[in-house]
Amino acid sequence: MKSVENCLIRFLFSLLLLMLSTTESLSQNIAFNHLTPDEGLSQISVNSLYADRDGNIWIATRVGLNCYDGNKLRIYANKRGNKNSLFCNNVKQVTGDGNRFLYLLCAEGIAQLDLTTLSFKTLLIDNNVGALCYHKQLFFSDRHKIMVYQPHSRRNKLYLTLPTKSHVTSINIDSRGRMWIGTRGNGVYCLASGKLSHPIQVGNITQIYEDHTQTQWIGSWNNGLWTINRQGKCTNITKGKLLNSNFVRAFCEDNSGMMWIGTYLGLTRYNPRTGQASTFIADNRENSLTNSSIWSIIKDKQGTLWLGTYFGGINYFNPEYE
């Protein structure tokens, strides 16, 4: 009798291992959908993404601003002689107020798009702008300064000057009202209750992102990533078990709490609860990534993740259905 019980236990244990290994195997096989120039995208390199109130995906490229409504792509670019068109086609970042306006950081300044009229307005012509952030008002950087755009007067007001002259590359305001400022070469500053601190003192910063636990995720060109939790503990993670590359460009948390990390050498899915990670790369399969270098990640209202790549257009998928 004991022999039968032992055999049954071994069988159940083997079945459990098989189920776990099968689940892990399936988790590696995400089917990515694609938007490339073959589908009408204006350019293969995607700098930034934004989902508007109606679910349209706005795509910043070096050759104009694209809009995907789920069925077709529309391209917005400069039209000579039309003052309501986009003044500069090289769009580096797109963000919005969550309602009526989009704001575009271009190679030559800042533009505004009115979503009700689809007309553009040039707000600033200046090639020293490094980052945009909208939080009740539009913040932007001018070299090592943070400015605020005042729409009624159409003037720019100085908000903050950093003590070092490193150019600002990223701005994010978290759920507690703190402003996080990434720089080129001098890491990250944090402005909280009028006091400026310098929690990370090295690194060329690419993006600053907050997850649902109020942890800040901070990417860099060559120093991997940092996390700063709610209690202020700062942790640096570099190439190894979690990351394929120390060039970390983008972050996005999905609806289940998984963190998706875009790097120069692939897309990493990281489970903060278990510490498990897996990485997806372009491998020439029909439904794989079109390019391994991930430049931007956003989540839309349906939980679909949209990935902008450096040389493969858009990849998108919904983690809940994979």
Image (cartoon, rainbow, N blue to C red):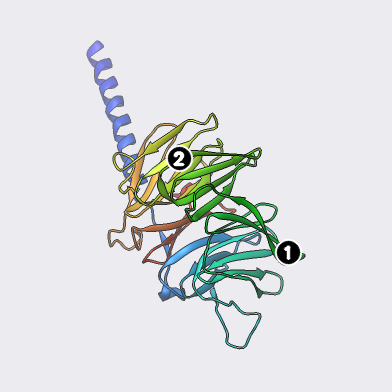
Q: Nearer the viewer, residue 158 or 251?
A: 158
- What kind of residue is marked 2? Ile
Q: Residue at x 44, y 32 (%)?
A: 273
Is residue 239 left or right of 111 when viewed as pictured?
A: left
Is residue 254 left or right of 27 when viewed as pictured?
A: right
- What kind of residue is marked 1? Pro
Q: Position of residue 214 (x, y in %)?
A: 56, 37
Q: Residue at x 38, y 63 (%)?
A: 310
Report the disc number at residue 151: 1
Label 1 SS: loop
Q: Earlier in the sequence, mark 1 or mark 2?
A: 1
Q: Position of residue 149 (x, y in %)?
A: 68, 61
On screen, 146 above or below 195? below
Spatial CA span between label 1 and label 2:
33 Å
Q: Which residue is mark 2?
A: 200
Mark 1 neighbour class, 10 Å CA radius: few under 14, some 14 to 19, many 20 or more = few
